[in-house]
Amino acid sequence: MNTIHVAFFAAFREQAGVESHTLQTAATSARELFDELRALFPGLEPYANMKYAVNDEMVHADHVLREDDRVLFFPPVAGG
Amino acid sequence: MSFIVSAAPIDVAALRRQMADDTCGAFTSFEGWVRNHNEGHRVRRLEYEVYAPLAVSEGERLIAQAREQFGITAAHVVHREGLLELGDCAVWVGVTAPHRDEAFSACRFLIDEAKVRLPIWKKEHYVNGDSGWVNCERCATHAGAG
């Protein structure tokens, strides 16, 4: 089990109802962690083109999580 | 030059002056403005949320890529955050190069990639009182219901 800090942005923050959350988890990847969080925050909806960041670096969904990582979940972006 | 996130209005004339360079024969710029409609909705204003630490580092990476790929002299991008009104400049891209071809190409590359790669989100506030996150259609339903 790792202690992981998560942060939600934009639509995800509104769906979850919180900006951040810390949890003990057995999830090994960013994608697995998101699936676990959907049980905690039932409003969360996955998007095919969502993005993940760990410790302020963009990562793939299968990025392996480590103790004390800060995982950021980004809904579909729309700059410009 | 660099990528900047700004809470204040973009001073286009000042940015253009900063790009001045005697070695360049071309300057291209792009301005993204707040439009009063989108996909059949009448838009009243826009709200940009930016995760600045990553938007800046990824934005700098984009600019470095543009310099390498197109051989331009310099590039600068400014993106607004917060509440914007109709007609406001939401994003400014400026590129200088010895010749126009690379300046046009790099400018197009920078705005296109910025829209899909940077952690920036746009929420539309509609004239009818609803709101919705762009590229996130189901969220508009939530907002309308809320």
Image (spheres, helix red, strand yellow):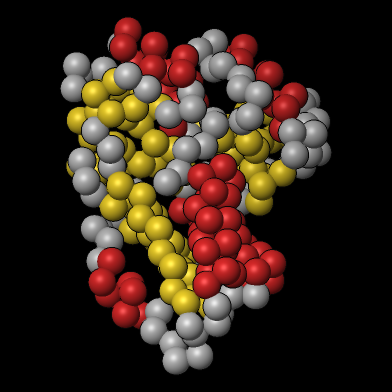
Please provide percent x and percent y for residue B9: 24, 58
Out of B103 and A31, give the one closest to the viewer.
B103
Out of A66 and B40, give the one closest to the viewer.
B40
Residue at image coords 66%, 51%: A57
Residue at image coords 47%, 47%: B51
Q: Is residue B104 above or below residue A40?
A: below
Q: Is residue B37 left or right of residue A51?
A: left
Please provide percent x and percent y for residue A1: 78, 30
Q: Is residue B48 above or below residue B146?
A: below
Residue A19 visible? The answer is no
Q: Quadrant of residue B124?
A: top left
Q: Quadrant of residue B97?
A: bottom right
Q: Is residue A9 above or below residue B92?
A: above
Please provide percent x and percent y for residue B111: 50, 53
User: Farthest top residue?
Assistant: B145
Residue A79 visible? The answer is yes
Please provide percent x and percent y for residue B35: 28, 38
Count the marks: how many? 0
Out of B111 and B138, give the one closest to the viewer.
B111
Residue at image coords 62%, 12%: A39
Residue at image coords 20%, 41%: B86
User: Farthest bottom residue?
Assistant: B22
Q: Is residue A10 left or right of residue B67?
A: left
